């Protein structure tokens, strides 16, 4: 069987909006590589992931794949910036035991003809677990931002509380964002919510600040900063919040946003 047949295609739900062309030089075994994290009962784990291209800003695929298992009453917090690679992709699969909590604050950025995406699956397998995902995307040129978030709640996982929030900001007309929430719920005493919206910079806010003498580039930066700042608000660690926002703003400054 040719190697190309083993690569993902747009027929795969989790790759529906991906740039499959960016995978052509990728070895098939790349898609079997996962980083496994287990958080013990009552413990807390947190991490900051930044995909920013390094020396090879927009070449090929830049991807991280995590499988996180949370034991009873454990907590995990992940802050993520996807801003590198022709196709930049973060995949996260989380399995939650009783009373566990998972928090995601994610940002995707990109212009040109790049695609930057976050793909998640929350597996609520025990009662009383909670998860919250907040993703903000800012794209320009012909850039694409994607968030595909799946929540699975098994029959015994009563009192589950799971939420997703996605918002996209398009700085230029050729850019696009896609949000695909998937909920598969078999328990009947749960709270599961998702919301998605796409827009441009608030013209009334721009006018208000311009009337007070602020230059256009400053206005633009302040509005974008406020927008992506939403992704950091629910993160418990202040240093992580600041680091995520600073790295995102640095990437935007390189672009001149």
Image (cartoon, helix red, strand yellow):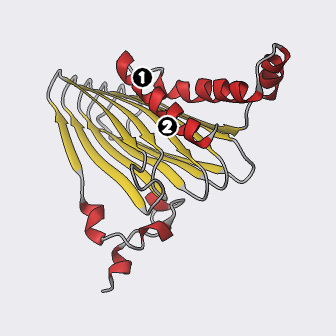
Q: Image quadrant of residue 130?
A: top left
Question: Sequence-wise, which precedes: disc 1 or disc 2?
Answer: 2
Quarter of the figure with the C terminus: top right
Whether 21 is drawn above or below 96: the answer is: below
Q: Which mark is residue 241?
A: 1
Residue visible at 43% across and 63% down in the picture: 60
Q: Position of residue 158 (x, y in %)?
A: 34, 29
Which of these two is toward me, 9 or 59?
Answer: 59
- Horizontal and vertical percent for residue 1? 30, 86
Q: Residue at x 36, y 19 (%)?
A: 239
| Mark 2 element type | strand
> Where does residue 3 sit, x and y in percent of width and height?
32, 80
Residue displayed at 37% across by 49% down: 91
In the image, farthest residue toward the bottom: 1
Q: Residues within 10 Å of mark 2 (few under 14, many from 20)?
A: many
Label for residue 107?
2
> Alpha-carbon neighbours of circle 1 within 10 Å: few (<14), some, or many (≥20)?
some
């Amino acid at each position: 069987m040719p190697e190309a047949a083993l690569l993902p295609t747009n027929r795969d739900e989790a790759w529906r909006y991906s740039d499959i062309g960016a995978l052509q030089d990728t070895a098939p075994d790349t898609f079997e590589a996962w980083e496994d994290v287990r958080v013990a009962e009552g413990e807390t784990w947190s991490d900051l992931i930044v995909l920013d291209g390094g020396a090879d800003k927009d070449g090929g695929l830049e991807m991280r794949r995590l499988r996180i298992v949370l034991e009873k009453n454990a907590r995990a917090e992940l802050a993520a910036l996807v801003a590198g690679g022709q196709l930049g992709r973060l995949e996260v699969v989380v399995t939650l035991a009783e009373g566990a909590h998972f928090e995601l604050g994610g940002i995707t950025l990109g212009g040109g003809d790049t695609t930057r995406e976050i793909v998640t699956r929350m597996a609520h397998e025990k009662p009383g677990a909670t998860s919250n995902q907040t993703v903000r995307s800012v794209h320009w040129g012909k850039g694409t931002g994607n968030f595909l978030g799946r929540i699975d709640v098994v029959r015994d996982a009563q009192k589950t509380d799971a939420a997703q929030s996605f918002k996209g900001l398009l700085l230029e007309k050729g850019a696009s964002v896609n949000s695909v929430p998937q909920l598969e719920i078999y328990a009947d005493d749960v709270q599961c919510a998702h919301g998605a919206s796409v827009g441009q910079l608030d013209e009334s806010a721009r006018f208000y600040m311009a009337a007070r003498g602020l230059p256009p580039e400053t206005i633009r930066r302040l509005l974008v900063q406020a927008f992506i700042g939403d992704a950091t608000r629910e993160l418990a660690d202040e240093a992580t919040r600041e680091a995520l926002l600073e790295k995102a703003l640095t990437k935007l400054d390189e672009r001149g946003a």
